[in-house]
Amino acid sequence: MNTRIAVIGSTEFIERIESITSEIAEIDFDAYIYQKPTEAGLLIKTLKPCDAVLFSGVLPYYFSKKYHEHLPVPSFYLAQDEMSVASSLLSVLYHKKISPHRISIDVSQASIVTNVLADLEIEMDTSYIMDYQEMLKDSFDISLITCYHQKLWKDGFIDLALTSVHSVFDQLQLIGVPAMRMVDPQSSIFKALQDIKAHTDLIKSRSSQIAVCYVISEEANAHELVDGLAHEIQASVQLLEDCHFILYSTRGDIESLMNRNGLNHFFAQLQKKGTIGFGYGSTIMDADRHAKIALGFAEKHSDDKCGYIFTEDKDLLGPFPQHAKQQRLKNDHPELLQVAKQTKLSPANISKIIQFSHSRQAVQFTAAELEDYLQVTRRTTERILKKLSDHGHVTIVGEEMTYSKGRPRAVYELNLPVY
């Protein structure tokens, strides 16, 4: 099945894409043309069904961010790189016979120009290079780029403006400033399209993965509620015993349910205790085993309403609906396996501690914070910290006074290769 990509860009960029479509197998395109990058957001609202969206550059991607972030398909943009700068400079030298010293350039990141100039041992006044990356954080005005080139040309410092923004090129043409568009190398476009196809193929493969769901509910109308959930995820339902159900679906349908807060809606309908465990796997046996593991975590949780997801990569997602953190229960890193062996802690516990570190902004932590994350008793937490401390994998770096009476709490830092 072909990958369908919605391409949002200027007329020139769309023509560039169309000129090479015959050389790209298994990819179909739908073109959406704007006059200015600021119009890209409006085009998002007109998209037909597709597998991915490709923007012609960082500007249309930025201007439509609040729209494409909510799309159910991934978005990409063709990034400027050293290849596009080098190709453009070569084109200027060959066709225009203009020295780089007499050129002004605008790019989203000045370093890609300075890197090329350094490699070619070309000296150029950096004031002739406009980096508009920082401008994106404020109220971006494309006319500022046009004025930048116009002033340099009017003052006699340059003979040509090399722009990465097609609408700036059009404006410069109108006011009589010699200008040229940045080249989009065919190799860069090919690579971007191949990367998008590989990414979307992976998403499709994962979405079609088998998913098993166990539901335990004590509600009087449990059958009705579970049937409603099954309809949401296009699942078949079996009643194992009173209050205990099993559903068969796909990973894509489960993730779609999560994205639209459908699981939270299900829990909101429950008046009594309810637990759910989702499992993903390449076979139905794997998915079933993972769903049982997820259900086990949900049943052990202190809240009456709880759900977990356990993936084929041994990632535990949850608890839902309270919050969704991720714990990796599989540990195959040699150094961390050695830590597990030294401390006699399970690889799963070492992985949870690593994920705890990743979830925090601060490096330092207390036993209470680790206890809350691991959802275990204080005694268990202190035992884990002692084992880590005995082998130098955690150190006490200070104390924290409590708000009530009692001894100060120790403040710890991990000494593990958490990245």
Image (tube, rainbow, N blue to C red):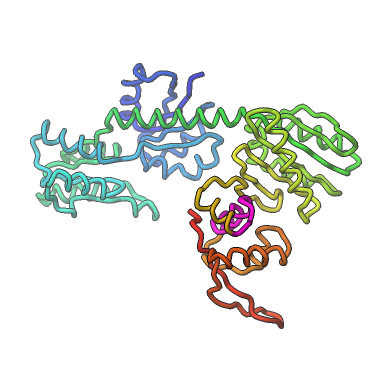
Is the residue 164 above or below the residue 374 in the image?
A: above
Q: Main secondary structure of the magenta part?
A: helix
Q: Which sits in the foreground, 363 or 31?
A: 363
Residue 376 relative to residue 34: left or right: right
Is the residue 180 above or below the residue 370 in the image?
A: above
Q: Which sits in the foreground, 96 or 330?
A: 330
Is 382 in the magenta?
no
Q: Which sits in the foreground, 391 or 359?
A: 391
Residue 80 appears at what percent x and percent y? 30, 40
Q: Which sits in the foreground, 387 or 173?
A: 387
Residue 228 relative to residue 290: left or right: right
Residue 150 appears at what percent x and percent y? 19, 47
Is 350 in the magenta?
yes
Which residue sits furthest top?
Answer: 22
Residue 234 relative to residue 86: left or right: right
Start and end of the magenta stretch? 343-359
- The image quadrant of residue 370 is bottom right
